[in-house]
Amino acid sequence: MLKSLAIAVIALCPVLANADGTLNPEEMTIGRMMDNIRNGHTDMTTCASGYFITKSGRHVMARELFEACAEAGYTGAMTWMSQLDNNGLGGDYDPEAAADWDRRAADAGDPVGQFNLGLNMIRGHGVRRDVEQGQRWIDTAAESGLPVARRMQASGYDPDEVTPDADNWKYAPLF
């Protein structure tokens, strides 16, 4: 009996193993998420893990993950790429690239991308200053129910309402 059980377990091992022969593969680890990305697998769980990766300070890794997910059409990853570029995390500080990511997300219907693009346009940060178009983007995000967009509308579109004054240096005119 014991011999039969041992043979059955050995026979099942290949069935229980991953395609590469791993018997107990990682599932919800950073390593697994990065393997998914590097193997071209972008899914909701993998893309959402970028939040935890960047919050842990692994910005280069988060950038790799978010970029792949953004290219696959995940608008939340586009807004995270904007945040990384706008703060020089895992790469250079690049307000133009940040605004480009926000535009892609906004054009795809993402309320956070719409809000960010509107705010960028009102400030002229990373894009040509266009207060009226910026307000329209804020309005669109507010119509979607985004609370911060509604707050900005209520303030008369005052950027100081939604951004700490500690960041004012970043948004000052460059010339």
Image (tube, grey):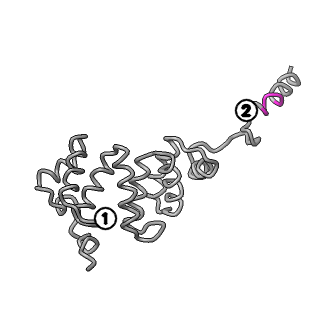
Which residues are the magenta region? Answer: 10-14
* Quadrant of image for the N terminus: top right
Sooner in the amino-acid sequence: mark 1 or mark 2: 2
Drawn side of residue 100 relative to residue 56, left or right: left
| Crowdedness near tag 2: few (<14), some (14–19) or many (≥20) residues, C-alpha within 10 Å | few
Residue lying at 41% horizontally and 47% vertically, measured from the top left: 75
* Quadrant of image for the C terminus: bottom left
Label 1 SS? loop
Q: Which residue is mark 2?
A: 16
Q: Does the magenta segment cover residue 11?
A: yes
**Marks 1 and 2, Cα distance to the nearest angstrom?**
53 Å
Q: What x and y, as percent, mark residue 72? A: 51, 46
Residue lying at 25% horizontally and 66% vertically, measured from the top left: 124
Residue lying at 57% horizontally and 49% vertically, measured from the top left: 33
| Crowdedness near tag 1: few (<14), some (14–19) or many (≥20) residues, C-alpha within 10 Å | some
Q: Camera-side residue: 130 or 1?
A: 130
Q: Camera-side residue: 107 or 49?
A: 107
Residue 80 sits in which quadrant?
A: bottom left
Q: Does the magenta segment cover residue 7?
A: no
- Amino acid type at mark 1: Val
- Amino acid type at mark 2: Leu
Drawn side of residue 36 relative to residue 160, left or right: right
Residue 127 sits in which quadrant?
A: bottom left
Residue 41 sits in which quadrant?
A: top right
In the image, which disc is placed on residue 127?
1
Label 2 SS? helix
Q: Camera-side residue: 119 or 45?
A: 119
Drawn side of residue 154 relative to residue 69, left or right: left
Q: What x and y, as percent, mark residue 85? A: 41, 64
Residue lying at 44% horizontally and 66% vertically, measured from the top left: 89
